[in-house]
Amino acid sequence: MAANGPVDDHSGRVLAGPTNPMVTPLLTDLYQFSMAYAYWKAGKHNERAVFDLYFRKNPFGGEYTVFAGLEECIRFIANFKLKKDEISFIRESLPGSSEDGFYDYLRRLDCSDVEVYAIPEGTVVFPKVPLLRVEGPIAVVQLLETPLLNLINYASLVATNAARHRFVAGKSKMLLEFGLRRAQGPDGGIGASKYCYMGGFDATSNVAAGKLFGIPLRGTHSHAFVSSFMSPDEIIEKTLRSSDGSSSCEDFVSLVQTWLNKIQRANSSHGSFGETNQSELAAFTSYALAFPNNFLALVDTYDVIRSGVPNFCAVALALYDMGYKAVGIRLDSGDLAYLSSEARKFFCMMEREFGVLDFGKMSITASNDLNEETLDALNKQGHEVDAFGIGTYLVTCYAQAALGCVFKLVEINNQPRIKLSEDVTKVSIPCKKRCYRLYGRGGYPLVDIMTGENEPSPKVEEQILCRHPFNESKRAYVVPQRVEELMKCYWPGSADKAREELPPLKDIRERCIRQLEQMRPDHMRRLNPTPYKVSVSGKLYDFIHFLWLNEAPVGVLQ
Amino acid sequence: MAANGPVDDHSGRVLAGPTNPMVTPLLTDLYQFSMAYAYWKAGKHNERAVFDLYFRKNPFGGEYTVFAGLEECIRFIANFKLKKDEISFIRESLPGSSEDGFYDYLRRLDCSDVEVYAIPEGTVVFPKVPLLRVEGPIAVVQLLETPLLNLINYASLVATNAARHRFVAGKSKMLLEFGLRRAQGPDGGIGASKYCYMGGFDATSNVAAGKLFGIPLRGTHSHAFVSSFMSPDEIIEKTLRSSDGSSSCEDFVSLVQTWLNKIQRANSSHGSFGETNQSELAAFTSYALAFPNNFLALVDTYDVIRSGVPNFCAVALALYDMGYKAVGIRLDSGDLAYLSSEARKFFCMMEREFGVLDFGKMSITASNDLNEETLDALNKQGHEVDAFGIGTYLVTCYAQAALGCVFKLVEINNQPRIKLSEDVTKVSIPCKKRCYRLYGRGGYPLVDIMTGENEPSPKVEEQILCRHPFNESKRAYVVPQRVEELMKCYWPGSADKAREELPPLKDIRERCIRQLEQMRPDHMRRLNPTPYKVSVSGKLYDFIHFLWLNEAPVGVLQ
């Protein structure tokens, strides 16, 4: 636990602001400032309000969500302060003539009197359970609504998407996030890299994200690199020193050509591939000369089987002669199941023909518009891909481009509040609450339960009644084997409490992977997953329905 | 035309960097640096390359796209320079041991030798036609690929989405972008606000975007504001000065109550609404006291017809007594067609009953998960909405979350290059090109045509053959009434050319609206729109197919 106040957990310095310097108190909806003014004008601005931030439905047709974005929220809150020019802009923007006193008030505003409880980042979470509970003077907390939602909605959505891709791909595959060019803006890209890593990806192509967050970087070369070469004749510097430095090959280009001829002959008994593309051969040779220890070639610029793979093998075998081990190939188009299997066969044939140990195990990376469905289809067809590079569908969350977190007032001045709606799923659960996850005998989480703040907490081995918040017939007795309180204090405000540390990204990622693994498999499957149960205590249930009846207008039929 | 070099068009100062300071040369894929190193190692880094940036398919099932993001690209290019710590990070990130000379080279790198031609921002554009043509030393241009794609893909996608929403809503409606909380990250939100405005929206709720880009701001209040009040008794400061300052109402709360009673009586002949919600009445009264000139109330917290609208009218009529004109209501749930019509009837009834001029014309704003389809459905059902607040579906481009712009090498050292693919739509069009839009007699654009760089340009009243680039049977003679060269020089690099100015956002928006209006209606309709024709000259057609045959490997059947 760290000391109170905006102190960085790792360095002891002041907590840094959000990663993106554009995340300022102005990154909010105008109506938050309009309401702040109206609260101030009514003398209500310091009334103590409690808001819950939660979502109503899991994304992607699934039954779970990964909670992400908390660290950015806390860094935002820790540094919340309006600048002079920002205040002038608000004054210009508010309609009508507003009073000066309000701007004096804005000038003094910060989050020192705001208290934030939250579920740890990287936790698997479910609808209706608050991810954040923000308590403080209503005008301030209202101003936080939009930025907190912005920082959590996409982060949680894309982390969940990454987790789902990992689930389909399986643990043994390498998953690479390649989405920067198609992301929704610059930090659509940077955020995607961060939160995909959190959700279980292994690396990113995004250099800025690598630098900011320490995420491993991966990449090969593009089609343009291949087509920028015309023929091997243009390679001038042809020397390659051997891996151990003991010798030198004066003409690596000829060595590659020799190998290509050998491959052609060896292959003629299996079926010939004709002439390979010379600009491709030149590009591969040149790339290998630049990165002899890390030769990974994109083999589909012209024709994977007739050109790309044989050209790759010629360069890889020439490298082998010089003591280097090639990394593998990348496929970026066509039938990835078929092409990866054919490539694998070719590698195995090379291993047999030329006695090169492990040549058959050459790594195959596949990219090209992959998503959950195509990964699933590849698994069903059978494939030989070792690593997947996933871009567009992952980072833009193409299957569902938004998560609908909301921020609802649940209590003001100790008075519980409810938001009604003709749509029952949109009715909010009132009261300042505590939330627990109850675990069963199998070690799996069984149910989340929300209680009023002052109710006794559920106890291990003690039976407790869990009720569906809105459906009176749905209830169950649970005897938990373990009880975990979900929300912790991440920003104590003026309260004399310890603040939870913000763990490094790697730790959050590990937590997330563990969390996903401990779920009962039927909640996680892609088709018809079982909903995880979210409940309220009997006492809270009764209170919700008392308040509901109290607030709903009675109609007059005539 | 502005002078050469990184000079701001409006102020004469250096062109500012991109809006988001996180857009740096590191916001790129690792493989761009790997390739830069391989080019450098092969002594190829200064070879002159030409890349085209284009997309292959219009988004949202439509037949047009709005080009956006250019200014950010030019500002990025103008300021392209690697910092010391960035270079150190690249050194750590490149695989294997790379040579020092490369990092000296990176240190000196900028875009002074890069030339960028582009279609003006806000232009309506079509598949395959280059939006940008970037020419320069191959290693540098390669590094630009990812950031340029990132800056253009989402910008163009969301501007197009905004234009499509405008098309369905019609010119007379007010369109408000309310998407910040659901956007894909902070500048998913800021970018959305900018490019939705460009695409024809009228205003945004995003205060930061208002400040950055001068976009008009709009907003009301939220449900939380309503439920934060308990009853009118809690309003302490009840005085309201009249609009002209001539008098004062000591108890505005009572005045509102008086009006509510009158409305109840007047309404009883049409059907009664029972008791209205008191916390809502308190919230509306309080909001009106804060913004008497701009009273716009969210009326669906409890029940629109039985509580929200009568409460609103009571406050609006009380304001009217004091010389103020209320703005209107916002609906955020339920059947918007029905509720807006019922609300309109109620307002008209108020106008008749109490003789309040124009009360029936009270503005009705609708929000709640609107998109193209729901706007279209509302139009078909009939509704009384004057303004639409659109969020999630607009800013996350929910119907299609990514635009697939690509960046392809079309020429190196004056040698045209082609990228083949088994999928014909993925074959690139080689050569450094010029692009023209040909207009017909109706004033409509008829066809875009690409030619080789040195071909004579199409001439007004002179017949020219336009060929489909890949389908030999599709060709047409065109006699243009007007010829518009599409690409202009936005970054001359070291060339002695004038640079196109970067116009202010308002001008781009106006250009965009004019561009959309001049299209033939059948290209624009939502259902089965006619594809706009994109063609190449006969000469370019022949050359594409010569190169294609030349590069494609000849198979061996056996």
Image (tube, coloured by chain):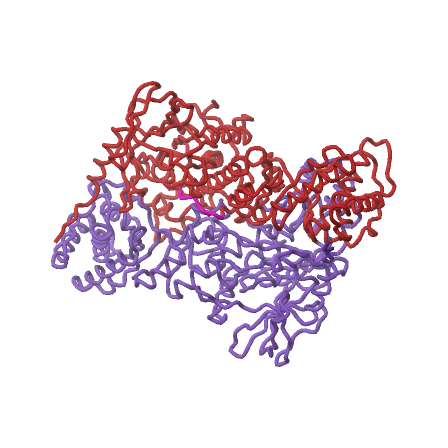
Chain colours: A red, B purple
Q: Say above or below: A252 vs B452.
A: above
In the rendered structure, does residue B74 fall within the stretch colored magenta?
no
Quarter of the figure that contains the C terminus of chain B? bottom right
Residue A470, image x, y percentages: 27, 37
Where residue B538 sits, quadrant-wise, is bottom right
- Relative horizontal placement of residue B158, taking residue A46 as reference (left or right): right
User: Can residue A279 be seen from the camera position used here?
Assistant: no
Magenta range: A398-404
Q: Nearer the viewer, residue A3 or A233?
A: A233
Which residue is found at the position 71% from the left and 42% from the top? A346
Which residue is found at the position 64% from the left and 46% from the top? A339
Residue A265, image x, y percentages: 80, 46
Q: Main secondary structure of the magenta part?
A: loop
Q: Say above or below: B336 vs A68.
A: below
Q: Nearer the viewer, residue A125 or A13?
A: A125
Q: Say above or below: A414 vs B374.
A: above
- Relative horizontal placement of residue A556, taking residue A95 as reference (left or right): left
Quarter of the figure that contains the N terminus of chain B? bottom right
Total labels drawn: 0
Q: Nearer the viewer, residue A123 or B391?
A: A123
Residue B540, image x, y percentages: 69, 68
- Relative horizontal placement of residue A385, taking residue B355 as reference (left or right): right
In the rendered structure, does residue A399 fall within the stretch colored magenta?
yes
Q: Kindly give the residue lying farthest to the bottom in the view shown.
A: B461
- Relative horizontal placement of residue B105, taking residue B370 as reference (left or right): right
User: Can residue B167 be seen from the camera position used here?
Assistant: yes
Residue A553, image x, y percentages: 19, 45
